[in-house]
Image (spheres, rainbow, N blue to C red):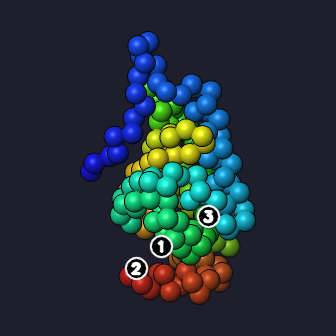
Amino acid sequence: MTRPADAAPTTATGTGRWTREELEEAFAGYQRTVEEAKRTGDWNLFADMFTEDATYIEHAYGNFAGREEIRPWIIRTMNSFPGNHMTEFPALWYTIDEQRGWVICEIDNPMCDPGDGSEHGASNLTILHYAGDGLWSCEEDVYNPTKFLRMAKKWCRAAESAGTLPDEARKWLEAVGA
């Protein structure tokens, strides 16, 4: 898979284009924006964090070129099952590559209680390429789609047993071949 060649150039001292402080602030802004998008359901906020020519590499859904290709995909994905039943997207850990201007993190994707108190979720690795001014030029989400599928099916079975399975989730379950 080809990644954009947007790694930050190095100076004579070998440091990257952005300071660690700026990268930390940008990642904190990324996390706040994801929280706000989830809280409000306005995933335009998420798309607006990317440069106009950004690349989004999503291993199950494909690659998206540009903010305006990312936008409809993220809105559709996060406003339909199972995305709309995920309660938050916290970073479990992260590391910053100052030289490249990258943030690499593990994002948790917990689902809401299906009605029986059980917990369901899966995590992914996210690689963010910083572009400056609080914007990102690339995001790559790395995960096992089969693990996410099994988790969502298990959530559906728990919700069905608890009598709380929404029609949207039932249709999704039928479509993926429960």
Residue 99: name its quadrant. Answer: top left
Disc 1 crowd rating (10 Å Cα; few below 14, some 14-19, many 20+) is many
Q: Residue at x 61, y 31 (%)?
A: 22
Q: Is residue 99 visible?
A: yes
Q: Please tell me whether mark 2 or mark 3 is closer to you in this view.
A: 3
Asked whether 169 or 101 is in front, the reply is: 101
Q: Earlier in the sequence, mark 1 or mark 3?
A: 3
Q: Which residue is tagged 1?
A: 153
Callouts 1 and 3 close, C-beta under 8 Å: no
Callouts 2 and 1 close, C-beta under 8 Å: yes
Going by the image, does 146 lie left or right of 77? Answer: left
Q: Which residue is tagged 3?
A: 44
Q: Earlier in the sequence, mark 2 or mark 1?
A: 1
Tally the numbered discs.
3
Mark pair 1, 3: CA separation: 28 Å
Q: Residue at x 46, y 41 (%)?
A: 129
Residue that lies at the very extreme toward the top in this rendered image: 13
Mark pair 2, 3: CA separation: 27 Å
Asked whether 92 or 15 is in front, the reply is: 15
Q: Please tell me whether mark 2 or mark 1 is closer to you in this view.
A: 2
Could you say where residue 4 lies in the image, as x and y percent from the top left? 35, 45
Q: Residue at x 39, y 39 (%)?
A: 6
What is the secondary structure assignment of the residue under circle 2? loop
Q: Which mark is residue 176?
A: 2
Amino acid type, residue under disc 2 in the picture: Val
Mark pair 2, 1: CA separation: 9 Å
Residue 145: name its quadrant. Answer: bottom left
Could you say where residue 47 lies in the image, as x and y percent from the top left? 56, 59
Could you say where residue 155 lies in the image, as x and y percent from the top left? 55, 70
